[in-house]
Image (spheres, helix red, strand yellow):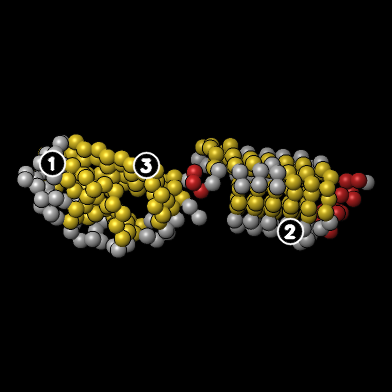
Amino acid sequence: MRKIIIFLALVLGIEVKAQIVGGYLPINSSKSATVGALRVNGALTATGVVTGGSFVTAGTSSVGSTQTVTGLATFGSSVTVAGSETVTGQLTAQSNTNLLGQATIQTQSTVTSMMPSTSGTLSNLADAYFTITFNHTASSPADAAVNYFGNGTSFSSNALYGQCLIPFNCVLYAWSYSSAMSAGTAETGTISIRKNNTTDLELNTAISYSSSIQTYTATGLSTQYSTGDLINLKETYPTWATNPTSVTEGITLYFYRRQ
C-alpha cells in the first residue's frame, strides 16, 4: 500500500520525501515529481519534471522535460533528458548519456563508457582542450617584410592568407613555436596572432633567426576568442645584416572551451 501511495503521489505531481524502490517506475503525468531520494532497480520514465536529492537507477532513465539532482546521480544504464539537466553533486553514467537540452554539472561528471570505447572525467568546459597548428614550408624572408601563414603550405604578404575558423568560444592558454633554417645574423622579429584581420596579439617580440633550430613556448595566457573568429599568424621580420634562408616554422596554439 505504501508503494502505491508513493507511486500515485509521483503521478499526480505531489512532493514525496521518502525513498522509492521498485522495478519499473513510470511517471506519465506532465506534472512534476519531487522526491527526497530516488532509487529504481529497473527503468525510470517521466514525461514531466523530476527533482530530487539523489537518484540511483539500475536501468535506463528517460525524462521528457527537466531533471534536477541536488545530490548524487548514478545511472546504471543510459539516461536521456529531453530538456535540461542540473546536477549539483556527482553524475555517473555507466552507458550513454543523451542530453537534448542543457546540462549543468556543478562539481564533477564521470563517464565510464563512451564511444569509441574511451573513459574520462569532465568537470567543466575548461577540461575540453583543443589545439590548432600552423606551419609553412621552407622560404627565405625579405628584410623588414610582414608575412602571414596559417592553414596553407607557405606564407604570403596577404593578411587574409591561411585564416582558420575558431569553432567554439574558447581561451588561448599556451603556445609553442619551432623553426629550422640556414641561420642569419642576430636581429629579431615578432610573431603575433592576427584575429579577423583587425587585431594582433603579440606572442613573442624577440624571435631569433641566428641558429639552425629555434624553439619558444609560453603558458598561463588567458586571451578569449569567440565562435566564428578567423585567425592566422603574422610575422614581422627585421632588417638583417645576413638574411636567414630556407626558413620553416610551425606553431601550435592551445585552447580550452568556454561558455
Q: Which residue is mark 2?
A: 48
- Distance from disc 3 to disc 1, alpha carbons, whole Å, reads 25 Å
- Of helix, strand and loop, which one carries label 1? loop
Question: What's the CA distance linking mark 1 and mark 2?
Answer: 70 Å
If you read the primary sequence from the N terminus, does the residue marked by circle 3 or circle 2 appear first?
2
Q: Residue placed at 64% from the left, 56% from the top?
A: 84
Query: In whole angstroms, how far apart are the C-alphas of marks 3 and 2?
Result: 47 Å
Crowding at dot 1, Cα within 10 Å, few <14 / some 14-19 / many 20+, comes out as: some
Q: Nearer the viewer, mark 1 or mark 2?
A: 1
* Three-letter code, disc 1: Ala
Label 2 is placed on what type of residue?
Answer: Gly
Categorize mark 2 by other alpha carbons within 10 Å: few (<14), some (14-19), many (20+).
many
Q: Residue at x 15, y 36 (%)?
A: 211
> Residue 108: horizontal and vertical position, in percent?
60, 42
Q: Secondary structure at mark 2?
A: loop
Give the percent coordinates (x, y) of residue 149: 24, 53
